[in-house]
Image (spheres, rainbow, N blue to C red):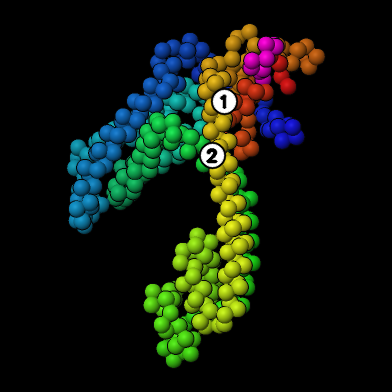
Amino acid sequence: EYVEFCKVLSIEFMDLESFRGWLEILYPSLWGGQFFTFVRSTGFEYLVDVLLVANSVLIGYQSRHELAGDELSGKAHFSGLANNLELIFTFVYFCEVLLKVLGFGWTQYWESNRNRFDFIITTATVGMNVMIMLPNGVDDRRWLRFASLLRLLRLLRLVTASSQFRMIGEAVNEILPVVGKVGRVLFCTFYFFSCIGVELFGGKITTDPNSPNYEALKGTDYFLNDYFPNNFNDFPSSFVTLFELMVVNNWIVICDGMTAVTSEYARLYFVAFHVVGVCVVNNLVVSVILDCFMTEFEHRRERKSMGRSSVTDKEGVRIEENTAVFDATSITGTNTKVTGKWVARVSGRGIGGRRKSSFLRTVFTHRGSGSKSHGR
């Protein structure tokens, strides 16, 4: 319950007027018309995706010489038609950003990470176009194509059309906040064993033929397989070596090499790391990943049973993606003296992905209880 209470504290409230865009406030009939309704729909996204595919074909055609291994200057392989098409695509992307800002309002537009990415890339592309067209001696359009290539990363969203891929992506999004905690445990484990490893085996592995340690390594699998880069001579090398030990990548070969240049008691070090690093820490990481996937699977099943439709009007709440629009009078009653339309949204990284919508439904409504919805 305490954790759920902390999640509730992450909800931000703002007046609906401050959340709406200026076009919706000044020209509500234009904002609610068919054109801007289409801009806010998924059909508009599909149209932009088609243009992105066409742009990728153009970039592939322009890069045919580089793909063939030819070395050309920044201007030689750009025809006039290709230049004009690049300008047209840049203008279309600029119009896309402008229409979305007008249709959603800046606050709603900037909440989406995908929109932020599009805005940054489009701004960079337009800036490069302006810089190239100005009489300043800068006419290398390869920088412009690089910015266009970044925009093509949006094509990855086509992969999310599969529900299985969406579940993986949402689970990864849920894992990210936990990675920091697990990563600190993993780093401390590596640092502790690196300190011991450098003290025990530092400088023992060498490729100097005159060294007695080099002679001791001859005939071992460590020597025959050229495992010399896997050593504890410094901290970076020891971290890499410990990672190989953690994933159990021929760790016996590394153990035999270190034993050859020290003593049989060196095996105790590797046994200790196997118990702590592999059996405990590595399994902890795997269990966290599996737990996130199972939790996301359960949330998806709950969302499917609950449905994605908006909350009924009689409840006074309308859930739209990661925001909840509600009438303060019907939700809080008259004791708070708060009236009018308000918007609630979940801030911070405590709740990730599509869970925000489910969480807002849980906070503002009771499903299947037969009771009237109310704020908790």
Asked if residue 77 lies in the magenta stretch, the reply is no
Residue beneath disc 2: 293
* Residue closest to the far right: 335
Residue 77 against residue 231 in the figure, above or below: above
Secondary element type, mark 2? helix
Task: Characterize the local packing of mark 1: few (<14), some (14-19) or many (20 or more) Cα atoms within 10 angstroms.
Answer: few
Q: Secondary structure at mark 1?
A: helix
Is 265 displayed left or right of 205 in the figure? right
59 vs 162, left or right, is left
Q: Which residues are magenta?
A: 364-372
| Residue depicted at x 67% and y 20% | 364
Residue shown at 19% from the left, 42% from the top: 79
> What's the magenta bit mostly, secondary-structure-wise?
loop
The image position of residue 362, as x and y in percent, is: 65, 23
> Which dot marks residue 228?
none
Label 1, on which residue? 302
Please indicate whether residue 115 sits to the left or right of residue 136 in the image.
Answer: right
Identify the image quadrant of the N terminus. top right
Rendering quarter of residue 175: top right
Q: Dividing the image into 4 quarters, which one contains the C terminus? A: top right
Q: Residue at x 19, y 40 (%)?
A: 80
Q: Name the side, left or right, on which 78 lies relative to 326.
A: left
Residue 365 painted magenta:
yes
Q: Amino acid at mark 1?
A: Glu
Image x and y of residue 5, in percent: 73, 31
Task: Choose top left, top right, bottom left or bottom right for residue 149.
Answer: top left
**CA distance for labels 1 and 2:** 14 Å
